[in-house]
C-alpha cells in the first residue's frame, strides 16, 4: 500500500461496529486535502486513521492502549509537519461499559438498521431480544 504518489490508505478499527456508512467516504475526502486523517474515539484513542503516504514515524512514541493515543498522535503529526484532519468523534468497544452503550444505541431502530450484522450478533449472544423494535419494545 501507499507505493504510488496518489495512493491513500484508511484503516478502521473492528471495535466500532456501528460506525456511520459515510465515514470511509469522509476519510478519503479528508486525505485529498491532508497528509493524514484520524477519527477520534471518545476514550482518547481513535477508531480510524488514514494516510496519503508512508508515515511510519507517526506511530512511534505513542502509548498504545492509553487514553493519550489521540493526543500523542496529534503531537507527532505536528512535529512531523503533517496536515492532520479529524473526523467526528465516535465510540469504540473496549470495556463492558462500552458494550452496554453499544447495546443501548442498537436498541434505537435507526442505529439497528445501519448495523444489522452487529444487531444480529448481539441477539445471538443474548444481549438483545430477537425482535426488538425502536425504544426497546419487543414484538409479541
Image (cartoon, rainbow, N blue to C red):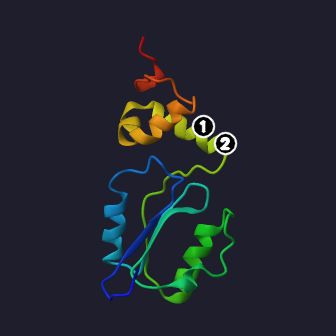
92 shown above or below 36: above
* Dot 1 and dot 2 residues touching (CB under 8 Å): yes
Q: Quadrant of the N terminus?
A: bottom left
Q: Nearer the viewer, residue 8 or 62?
A: 8
Q: How many marks?
A: 2
Query: Which dot marks residue 96?
Result: 2
Q: Quadrant of the C terminus?
A: top left
Image spot of residue 120 (x, y percent): 45, 35
72 shown above or below 14: below
| Residue extending furthest toward the top | 140
Image spot of residue 10 (x, y percent): 41, 69
3 shown above or below 48: below
Image spot of residue 85 (x, y percent): 42, 72
Q: Residues within 10 Å of mark 1 (few under 14, many from 20)?
A: few
Query: Which dot marks residue 72?
Result: none
Q: Which residue is rendered at x = 40% and y = 42% of the image?
A: 115
Q: In this image, 50 relative to 56: left or right?
A: left
Q: Which residue is rendered at x = 52% and y = 28% of the image?
A: 128
Image spot of residue 35 (x, y percent): 41, 81
Q: Which residue is rendered at x = 45% and y = 46% of the image?
A: 18
- Give the labeled residue for mark 1: 100
Element marked by disc 1: helix
| Residue extending furthest toward the front | 124
Q: Quadrant of residue 7?
A: bottom left
96 shown above or below 41: above
Q: Which residue is rendered at x = 46% and y = 67% of the image?
A: 11
Q: Rounded to the nearest whole Å, what is the CA distance between mark 1 and mark 2?
A: 6 Å
Q: Residues within 10 Å of mark 2 (few under 14, many from 20)?
A: few
Q: Quadrant of residue 63?
A: bottom right
Amino acid at each position: 500500500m501507499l507505493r504510488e504518489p496518489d495512493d491513500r490508505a484508511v484503516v478502521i478499527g473492528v471495535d466500532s461496529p456501528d460506525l456511520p456508512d459515510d465515514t470511509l467516504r469522509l476519510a478519503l475526502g479528508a486525505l485529498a486535502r491532508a497528509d493524514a486523517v484520524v477519527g477520534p474515539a471518545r476514550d482518547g484513542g481513535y477508531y480510524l486513521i488514514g494516510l496519503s503516504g508512508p508515515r511510519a514515524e507517526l506511530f512511534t512514541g505513542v502509548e498504545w492502549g492509553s487514553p493519550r493515543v489521540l493526543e500523542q498522535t496529534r503531537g507527532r503529526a505536528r512535529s512531523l509537519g503533517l496536515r492532520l484532519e479529524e473526523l467526528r468523534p465516535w465510540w469504540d468497544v473496549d470495556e463492558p461499559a462500552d458494550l452496554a452503550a453499544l447495546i443501548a444505541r442498537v436498541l434505537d431502530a435507526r442505529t439497528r438498521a445501519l448495523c444489522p450484522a452487529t444487531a444480529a450478533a448481539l441477539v445471538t449472544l443474548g444481549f438483545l431480544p430477537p425482535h426488538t423494535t425502536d425504544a426497546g419494545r419487543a414484538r409479541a
